[in-house]
Image (tube, rainbow, N blue to C red):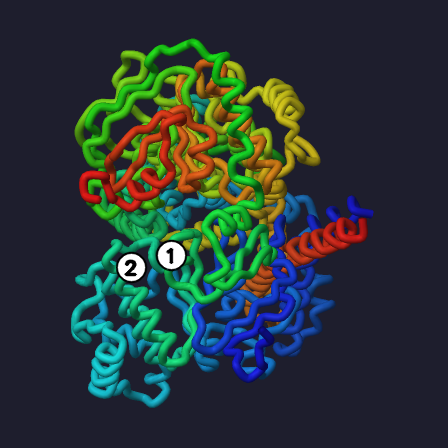
């Protein structure tokens, strides 16, 4: 089905973008037709956001060009993009909380060029757009008083007020409740009916199949597939996205299963409550047990309290109620430092921000949690020789590809950076290893490596808590799987009895009693 | 080849020092002076005799310490803008001890003054660190404001309890000779404090890169979240860093009071804190860089002062020179960063091409 030039709203031609240490986009071609919803699907770090920031003028591509409505354009800033009818709804809102809705809509919309902002006209326009697209908001409400879903509406109104004909939405459902998601989707459908286009960035497969006309899959900065919705299946998309057959570890895990006999209880979590950043109960009366020699996997849609649970286990977040018991010791109220000494390793979701100090060297990152132990320091002075010997050994044992042990961690590839984190945490995890999204953004080889490392920890008799939004990862690695939804574990399955369909339903909160 | 490139890039601040001097030269042209002549005279004056050469080092001594006061905290991405106030508090401690314990013998009296000035400056600074740790206060503003409080305390003490016996000017009595830091070279203003300042710079380097405390400081500085996840208590780091930084600035007060002035005059050396910030940035917040930059500023001051006295150039030209040098060095860091990023991109592109051709 050839596409005519005049039908195209936006065309990206051979976009390439380098960042120090990585290639974010590599020779990407993308066509968006008028009246079309295109989903950009990919794992975190696949280059979706970078590509859209280029289209929105926030980044400049290192090569390639952009056409809007068939004309070659240079987009040097978001102002340029808006002038061309391109709007973007960011994942983190760009509103001024202490201003009203109408003030936010007017801000930067060119009204100040005229010398005075015409509030009454803007209010009329907001009301008109609100009716047309079912996006009604009180124009005089202060943004800080609005719920998240309403704030997103304001963002959308802001873009529409600037005459957006192509809307880029960066993971718009990440912050929304299911009902709000449904309303957002109905807006997207209306917007498309009006002949406009939407680029929808996501890593959630069900949403893609729900809303998109066409699906473009990105992996490691490359376009790896392009499908019409009618041709797409969840399985095929998942495979394209992650780049590997999702069940390839199962047989190996099963083969190893017999080797593990040790079954002492290591971690007991009893009815804990943990507050999230917004003050709600992110973890709400959650209980679970993990034995030694067991991987306990938590499946769930991102944002259901998984990260808060992991942070509570590692002392980064206060536990308001309940008990956490590790080998008969209560962990509640202990500091991060104490918990490291209790033998809890933690592979955090964001290795750049949480797992590493990128500007420090490889060897400094390897001892980041143990630099004051007698092995590496005496009387407060670091023992450079011991640190170096240790680092050399780890670099060899884990095959970390680095020019030297004093190279800065930021110069390494993602896979090798993750190896640093893993090597360090395995050295600490004598009781429990908590791994959150441990393969996020890694290529096939590196992800395999991480999986094997987790299995090794389990085979040595330690307990592993694996938290991942990739269901396939949880299913292939875990001995038991708990499904987490809104801060609770709804049900626990043994792997052999795991029913993918039931897990999928539980992940969105549908329990069997209701169906 | 690659090595040469590295060296070339690491010498970037040096080129920009010359660029800054060249830009100041253009200013001199506007003032109707031949910059070449001015610079020639500046160098001749600065290095004319042993007295002037020694004076360069004497001028650099407190600048090294206020430079460290900013630079040390900067390694933890904390902004200590209050070195001026910490310096004054150190001055007050030093002069008070000198006057109060004047009957004590020289080594003991000096030791008391030295320790008192560091403790006073350190405690003054650690209030800022504590407020940041406890209340998440903004250390930039707080340390800046704390200088005004320190100035007020100094004004009160010098016009009140500490005023000279004659009671005429807002200044203290001259301290006894037992409280004077001995000269390093006789008949010059250079005293043993310079050697102490070098030792302090080495101490700062040692703390930062060789100890577990320094590890914490740098980890907090480079990635606060990462440090927290690694079990480092960032709040303790805030307080410790501000204590050490404040102690450096306080020690500068001891050097100036007991080494040069031998008394405390109200509101003297009012730019030593600000110059310290510039020197720390010029020296890339590295103790060695800070020592070298302080020496450069010392030379500009000594040579510049004499040029100004003997020619019709206005004395503000010294400030202009210092300003241009700082500006061009700061800009050079950004340019250097860009060059590094560009070459990194080029490397990636070549790597990719090689992979494709395989």
Describe residue A379's horizontal placement relative to residue A307 as left or right: right
The answer to whether residue A264 is seen in the rendering is yes
Per the image, the residue denoted by label 2 is A181
Residue B166 visible in the displayed image: no
Looking at the image, how many numbered discs can be counted on the residues?
A: 2
Give the camera-side residue of A63 and A388.
Answer: A63
- Which residue is at the front of the view, A387 or A411? A411
Is residue A46 found left or right of A189 in the rendered image? right
From this view, report whether residue A215 is shown above or below residue A33: above
On residue B253, the disc is none
**Residue B255 in picture, x, y percent from top left:** 47, 38
Image location of residue B348, percent across then percent down: 70, 52
Q: How far apart, in angstroms, are the residues tagged by discs 1 and 2?
A: 9 Å
Q: Position of residue B286 (x, y in %)?
A: 57, 42
Residue at 67%, 34% (x, y): give it.
Answer: A401
> Would you name the residue on which mark 1 appears?
A207
Q: Residue B19: percent from the left, percent from the top?
A: 67, 63
Do tag 1 and tag 2 residues touch (Cβ < 8 Å)? yes
């Amino acid at each position: 089905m050839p596409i005519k030039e005049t039908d195209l709203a936006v065309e990206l031609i051979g976009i390439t973008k380098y960042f120090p240490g990585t290639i974010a986009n590599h020779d990407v071609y993308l066509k968006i037709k008028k009246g079309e919803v295109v989903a950009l699907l990919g794992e975190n770090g696949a280059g979706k956001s970078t590509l859209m920031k280029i289209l929105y003028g926030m980044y400049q591509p290192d090569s390639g060009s952009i056409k809007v409505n068939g004309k070659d354009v240079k987009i040097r800033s978001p102002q340029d993009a808006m002038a061309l009818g391109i709007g973007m709804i960011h994942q983190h809102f760009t509103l001024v909380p202490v201003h009203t809705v109408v003030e936010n809509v007017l801000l930067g919309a060119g009204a100040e060029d005229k010398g005075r902002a015409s509030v009454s006209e803007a209010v009329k326009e907001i009301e008109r757009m609100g009716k047309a697209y079912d996006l009604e908001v009180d124009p005089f409400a202060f943004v800080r008083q609005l719920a998240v879903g309403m704030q997103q509406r304001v963002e959308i109104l802001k873009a529409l007020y600037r005459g957006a004909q192509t809307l880029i939405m960066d993971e718009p459902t990440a912050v929304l409740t299911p009902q709000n998601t449904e309303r957002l989707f109905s807006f997207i459908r209306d917007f498309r009916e009006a002949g406009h286009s939407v680029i929808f960035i996501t890593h959630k497969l069900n949403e893609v199949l729900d809303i998109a006309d066409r699906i473009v899959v990105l992996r490691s900065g490359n376009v790896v597939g392009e499908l019409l919705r009618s041709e797409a299946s969840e399985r095929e998309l998942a495979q394209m996205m992650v780049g590997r057959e999702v069940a390839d570890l199962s047989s190996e895990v099963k083969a190893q299963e017999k080797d593990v006999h040790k079954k002492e209880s290591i971690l007991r979590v009893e009815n804990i409550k943990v507050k999230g950043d917004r003050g709600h109960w992110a973890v709400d009366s959650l209980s679970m047990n993990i034995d030694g020699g067991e991987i306990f996997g938590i499946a769930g849609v991102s944002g259901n309290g998984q990260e808060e649970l992991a942070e509570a286990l590692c002392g980064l977040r206060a536990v308001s109620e309940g008990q956490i018991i590790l080998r008969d010791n209560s962990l509640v109220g202990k500091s991060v430092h104490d918990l490291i000494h209790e033998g809890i390793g933690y592979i955090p979701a964001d290795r750049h921000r949480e797992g590493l100090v990128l500007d420090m060297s490889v060897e400094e990152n390897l001892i980041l949690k143990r630099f004051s132990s007698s092995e590496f320091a005496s009387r407060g002075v670091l023992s450079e020789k011991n640190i170096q010997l240790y680092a050399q050994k780890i670099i060899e044992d884990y095959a970390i590809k680095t020019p030297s042990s004093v190279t800065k961690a930021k110069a390494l590839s993602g896979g090798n950076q993750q190896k640093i984190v893993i090597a360090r945490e395995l050295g600490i995890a004598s009781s429990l290893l908590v791994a959150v999204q441990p393969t996020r953004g890694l290529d096939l080889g590196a992800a395999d490596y991480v999986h094997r490392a987790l299995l090794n920890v389990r085979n040595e008799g330690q307990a592993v808590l694996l938290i991942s939004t990739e269901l396939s990862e949880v299913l292939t690695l875990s001995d038991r799987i708990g499904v987490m939804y809104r801060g609770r574990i709804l049900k626990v399955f043994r792997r052999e009895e795991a029913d993918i369909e039931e897990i999928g339903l539980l992940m969105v909160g549908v329990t069997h009693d209701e169906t | 080849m690659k090595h040469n490139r590295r060296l070339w890039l690491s010498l970037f601040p040096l080129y920009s020092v010359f660029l800054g001097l060249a830009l100041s030269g253009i200013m001199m042209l506007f003032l109707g002076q031949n910059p070449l002549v001015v610079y020639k005279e500046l160098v001749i004056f600065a290095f004319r005799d042993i007295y002037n050469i020694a004076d360069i080092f004497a001028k650099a001594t407190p600048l090294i310490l206020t430079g460290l006061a900013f630079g040390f905290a900067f390694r933890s991405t904390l902004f200590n803008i209050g070195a001026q106030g910490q310096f004054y508090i150190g001055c007050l401690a030093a002069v008070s001890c000198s006057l109060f314990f004047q009957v004590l013998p020289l080594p003991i009296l000096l030791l008391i003054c030295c320790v008192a000035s560091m403790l006073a400056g350190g405690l003054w600074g650690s209030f800022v660190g504590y407020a940041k740790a406890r209340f998440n206060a903004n250390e930039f503003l707080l340390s800046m404001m704390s200088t005004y409080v320190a100035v007020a305390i100094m004004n009160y003490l010098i016009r009140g309890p500490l005023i000279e016996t004659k009671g005429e000017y807002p200044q203290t009595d001259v301290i006894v000779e037992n409280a004077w830091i001995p000269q390093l070279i006789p008949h010059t203003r250079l005293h043993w404090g310079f050697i102490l300042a070098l030792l302090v710079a080495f101490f700062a380097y040692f703390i930062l890169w060789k100890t577990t405390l320094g590890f914490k400081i740098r980890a907090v500085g480079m990635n606060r979240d990462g440090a927290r996840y690694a079990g480092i208590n960032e709040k303790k780091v805030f307080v410790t860093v501000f204590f050490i930084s404040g102690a450096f600035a306080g020690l500068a007060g001891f050097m100036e009071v007991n080494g040069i002035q031998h008394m405390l005059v109200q509101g003297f050396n009012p730019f030593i804190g600000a110059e310290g910030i510039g020197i720390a940035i010029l020296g890339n917040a590295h103790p060695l860089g800070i020592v070298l930059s302080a020496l450069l500023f010392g030379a500009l001051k000594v040579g510049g002062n004499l040029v100004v006295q003997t020619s019709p150039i206005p004395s503000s030209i010294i400030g202009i020179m210092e300003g241009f040098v700082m500006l061009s060095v700061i800009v050079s860091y950004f340019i250097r960063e860009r060059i590094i990023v560009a070459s990194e991109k080029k490397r990636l592109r070549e790597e990719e091409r090689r992979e494709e051709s395989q």
